[in-house]
Amino acid sequence: MTKKGVFISIQLSEMPKGTRLLHGKLVFKQKVDANGQPERKKTRCVAQGFRQVPRIDYHETYSLVTKISSIRLICAMAAAYNLELEQLDVKTAYLNGTLEETINMAPPKGICSSPDEIWLLQHALYGLKQSGKVWNDLIDKNLQNLGFKPSSMCLYIQQGWHHDTHATICG
């Protein structure tokens, strides 16, 4: 998280008077392979977004969700026209979105930090109410910059060279 610039460390005394301090926790998960054997361990820092106050800690939380009918349509078209489908997962997706609000968070227990250190969040964290919207706004902007046009909720179409058409579903 430090390498991605998710937060800036500041001292508790630097926090403006009247601002709120959120807390978070570390969530540990063991990933398994297709055979159910342990593959790797994963740690995620999660903010306690349930403590956020509307219009202070966040403004909007709505983000689009892919309709199952859009996914079915793309799969049916790919099968009918013998097209290739690809799927990808964006690692640490929420950490890519930049926050507009000022959010101060105490480092979770287990993180080596001084007792007076707090984090000024720069990017969204899992658990924040606005994280989904922040990520959706970012992917929408980047897909449109690549020439994709929004067709319906979370479905983007791009007319390529030689009449190739590319469709992308974000969900």
Image (cartoon, grey):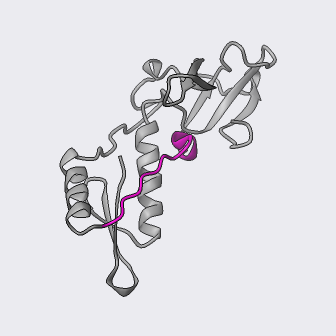
Q: Residue 3 at x, y = what percent? A: 74, 42
Residue under the image location 58 percent in, 21 percent down: 30
Q: Give yes or no for residue 158 being in the magenta stretch.
A: no
Q: Is residue 93 shown in magenta? A: yes
Residue 8 % position (x, y):
72, 36
Relative vertical location of residue 59 with respect to residue 85 in this rendering, above or below: above
Residue at (22, 46) in percent of width and height: 67
Stretch of the chain drawn in magenta: 83-99
Which quarter shows the N terminus?
top right
Answer with the quarter of the image where residue 109 lies. Answer: top right
In which image quadrant can residue 80 be found?
A: bottom left
Q: Is residue 20 visible?
A: no
Q: Nearer the viewer, residue 157 or 105?
A: 157
Q: Nearer the viewer, residue 26 or 78?
A: 78
Classify residue 88 as left or right of residue 68: right
Give me the residue at 46% from left, 46% from top.
135
* Side of 95 relative to 131 (left or right): right
In the displayed image of the protein, which residue is found farthest to the right? 114
The residue closer to the viewer here, 5 or 162, is: 162
